[in-house]
Amino acid sequence: MPRPFDDDFAEEPDEEPAGIPEEDLWFLPGPYEDDDPLGQPLPRADRRALFDPEEWRAAEQALAGPLAGLSLAFGELDLRLRQGPPGLRLRLALQEVANLSWWAGTRFPVERLGLWLALRVGSTAESEAALARAGWATRRLTHGPAPAQDIGGFLDRPGDTTEDLTLLLRALTGLHPVTQAAVLFQAWRLIGPEIARDLEAAVLAARHGAAMSRLPGQGAPFLPLATGGPGGLQGQGEPRRKLGAWIAGAEQSVLAALLHLERLTAWRQRAETATGDLSGRVPALLLDVIEGWPLVAAPLAEAETGASRAAVQRNLDRLTERGLIEEVTGQGRFRLWRARL
């Protein structure tokens, strides 16, 4: 007599039953075509690189003419700064950072930025952090090693946060420094920390772009990007459109910087002629200070020249009488002077 559950222990047949037709298994996932160990039949993320060096290489080749024009203009700026006094580099850096601050939304006039950087005056609790970032930007544009040597150190960021940026720069080897700068700018705006990333990206790109200098470190320390307007920083679309806007904006800024240098050079020549009869070293040193800083206070002039307060004040009065500088506050104390360009 058969016992309950005997069927559970029955031997399996030698032949497998006929399978279900494949067209009836429409609800099952299809065969996997990759080596994904999880085998998840889900939408996959786009694994393409955010910045394809070959796309930017093609854009660079298509824009060879505008890129050559920018390189020529920068070469002239580089030569002018290599032959001029150091104060000109500071003056252009302050102007560039002031324009970058407007683009980034903080809006510091160049005079206010200069006073804060020189004397730490003119800030409030609300503006202190933004002015500190602007001061960092000015220092990075004028001093220190180039970003290519140590991007993390240049940005004051831990190495792990800038590792992708370092690898990207290596992948861009062979491209023009202007093109590399444009890619670094776009990349850091995407992956950098939200606070100050726009300003950091622009400063990083400006310093790296100056690598096209014939004698890096001796002439123009940075490639102006905002002095002539922020158009180059606002390029959108595919790489060719971005690079085209980048080159056009940079060239406009370089030309604006050259025009500013022309005005400063003309003022300096006029000032040297008008002060040729003055004795001592203080007048010439004072002209250096006024040439480099948008606004000059007596304590700043005293510190920069090493002269006494009385000598500084006496020569400031002389320069004012001769129409070379003007006092802008109209006060009896805490007065400020600037060049009459």
Image (cartoon, rainbow, N blue to C red):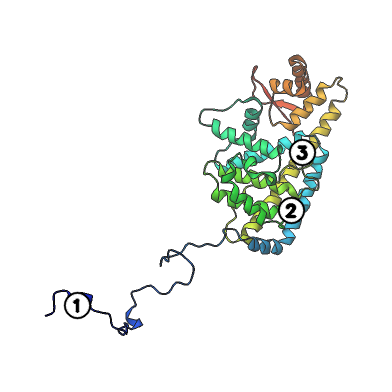
Q: CA distance from mark 3 to mark 1?
A: 104 Å
Q: Nearer the viewer, residue 255 or 241?
A: 241
The disc at residue 7 is 1
The residue sitting at the front extreme is 1
Q: CA distance from mark 1 to mark 2?
A: 88 Å
The disc at residue 291 is none
Q: Whole-percent x and y of residue 70?
A: 74, 53
Q: Are marks 2 and 3 in contact (CB under 8 Å)?
A: no
The residue sitting at the left extreme is 1
Badge nearest the viewer, 2 or 3: 2
Q: Are marks 1 and 2 in contact (CB under 8 Å)?
A: no
Residue 83, compared with residue 26, is above or below; it is above
Crowding at label 2, few (<14), some or many (≥20) Cα neighbours within 10 Å?
Answer: many
Q: Whole-percent x and y of residue 234?
A: 59, 52
Name the kind of residue labelled 2 in the image. Answer: Leu
Residue under circle 2? 70
Q: Nearer the viewer, residue 203 or 29?
A: 29
Residue under circle 3? 263
Crowding at label 1, few (<14), some or many (≥20) Cα neighbours within 10 Å?
Answer: few
* Residue 225 visible in rendering: no
Instruction: Say which residue appears at 78% left-offset and 16% top-offset.
Output: 311
Name the kind of residue labelled 1 in the image. Answer: Asp
Q: Whole-percent x and y of residue 247?
A: 68, 54
Q: CA distance from mark 2 to mark 3?
A: 21 Å
Say which label, 1 or 2, has the lower sequence index: 1
